Image: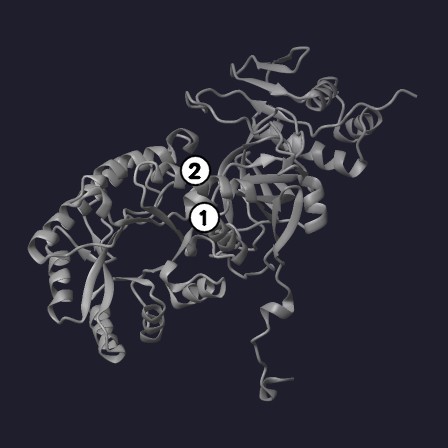
Amino acid sequence: MAPKKTYSKPTIVRHTVGVMNKFGRPPATVPMSRLSGFSVEELAGEYGSPLYVLAVNELRERYRDMTRAFQTRYPKAQIAYSYKTNYLKAVCSILHQEGAWAEVVSGFEYDIARNLDMPGNKIVFNGPYKTREELIRAFNDGAMVNIDNYDEMQLIEDISDELGKILEVGIRVNMDLNNPPWHKFGFNIEAGHAYEAVKRALSNNKLKVVGLHLHAGTYVDDVTVYSRAAQGLVDFYAYIKEQLGVKLKYWDIGGGYASRNTLNWAWMPAEQTCPTFDQYAEAICPILMNGPFQAQDAPRLFLEPGRALVDEPFSMITSVVAQKRLPGGTRGVVLDAGMNVLSSVQWYNYNFQTAQDSGQMLEDTILFGGLCMNIDVLRQNASVPPVRRGDLLVIPHVGAYNISQSWQFIYLRPNIIAIEDGKIHVIKKSDTRDYVQEFENVPDEFKK
Amino acid sequence: MKNIFKSELTLSQNGFLFDHGSGLTYTLNPTGQFIFKNIEEGKQAPGILRLLINEFDVSEETARKDIDDFFRQLSEAGLID
């Protein structure tokens, strides 16, 4: 008897035009069957699905590339990694190995950094809400504290009295850079608030202003925004130097650098729009180097990247659990990963690649997450070849925010592995029911 | 039995389908072509299922689900009722 022919799911796809833009995209029909040299199928078999996978060498490369881009143009540039983007201990530790300092925005994050043996004088402490105890610890450790508001300034003056010394502080400022403006944080330059804040800080002889902090926004892929921010810092520094005699030890241009993930409302793919580190550095550094100082007195420049470092080195492996035909004819595919472990689907049109050869017949598909909630849609419209239950998909570039913002909800959160030099490390085990309920209690009165 | 397509359709040897009624064109993969040709010959779903299993390396369960889905796709495309 003749061998049977190879089977693929029967499909009929209507021809349409105009779905591609002139720059194209990597075809979804090219399978992404390996990650860091390992078979996706074997990784899922061994560590489960869904699964986060970190390519450690890519993380190191991105750190080194960014450092090179900035230090060649501004030698005293220093990366302080934005912990909130992904504060897995292993991730922070790898970046500290490479030389990154820590940028934290809460006492919890501060504690993570100290627990990783980061000395206080390599921690930048930002954010609108820092408690008295956290601030005392930070000042005692010699951390760089950037003041967000007058209440905080007054609190730090009290701490100055308590510690019996003049405290060095940074002032967080904002300016008109985005629409809508980012005026939640710090003191506004154009309205004169930032100048008043510096003057106020110096008035009681309790604080010494040695830093300025300005953050341009989030996912800012227009480098001219950073040029304007840099010019704003230069002008403001020149003014407070002249008027108030301020001499900065550091200035901090924050984070917000983009990664190669396409935003939901963007029509150009991020591969085309995401600036390189060199482009960001070229937009920022020459302007800052023209600041009011001799080259040898240049303040240290802090950069606070998060997304731009950790987004791309992470991938997620997920499985098809079901597919259905929706009214209107669109295909729906249900995956075992949901918004609980992929919260950035609110902002991103993630790229979904099949891990196996599924043929060339792309079809518009809604990708649903596995949560029993109607809002759990991972992508409204993806071109996906025929897949069936059990097939694996790979979602590249998932390292920013998805892990630190993951919710324990309906399902247990998955394993996270890191691969380097052919070695696989589990850097966070999947949740267990015991772990999730560890701090719960059912009083005797409530027991049946 | 007469085939169930609503308008005149022509399928090329490599899976290109032209709908003479609407002017729309489609591409069918090899299994899609196989099912389409059997519908053209007037066969019905249970018969097509048996032929598909004999011809291709596929379980009955998978083939049954896929044929159902293929008929739904033909219906949504307006090619059958």
Distance from disc 1 to disc 2, alpha carbons, whole Å, reads 25 Å
Is residue A119 visible from the viewing direction of this image?
yes
Is B19 above or below relative to A177?
A: above
For label 2, the residue is A65
Is residue B37 or residue A376 the one in the foreground?
A376
Q: Amino acid at mark 2?
A: Asp
* Badge 1: chain ID: A
Most extreme residue toward the bottom, as rendered? A445
Q: Give percent across and percent down for residue A65.
A: 43, 37
Of A399 and A180, which appears nearest the observer?
Answer: A399
Q: Nearer the viewer, mark 1 or mark 2?
A: 2
Tag count: 2
Left/right placement of residue A15 relative to residue A184 reads right
Callout 1 amino acid: Ser
Residue in the image at 19% along x and 47% along y:
A233
The chain that hosts pointer 2 is A
Outermost front residue = A296
Query: Of marks 1 and 2, which one's residue comes earlier in the chain?
Result: 2
Query: How far across and down, in percent of the image, does residue B71 sit?
Result: 66, 30
Q: How is the image coloured?
A: one colour
Quarter of the image holding residue A324?
top right
Secondary structure beneath label 1: helix
For label 2, the SS is helix
Read off the residue under disc 1. A344
Quadrant in which the C terminus of chain A is drawn = bottom right
For the N terminus of chain A, the quadrant is top right
Q: For this rendering, which residue is in front, A83 or A143? A: A143
Q: Which mark is residue A405?
A: none
Q: Residues within 10 Å of mark 2 (few under 14, many from 20)?
A: some
**Residue closest to the eye, B48 or A385:** A385
Residue A227 image point, x, y percent:
23, 38
In screen coordinates, is A425 left or right of A21? Answer: right
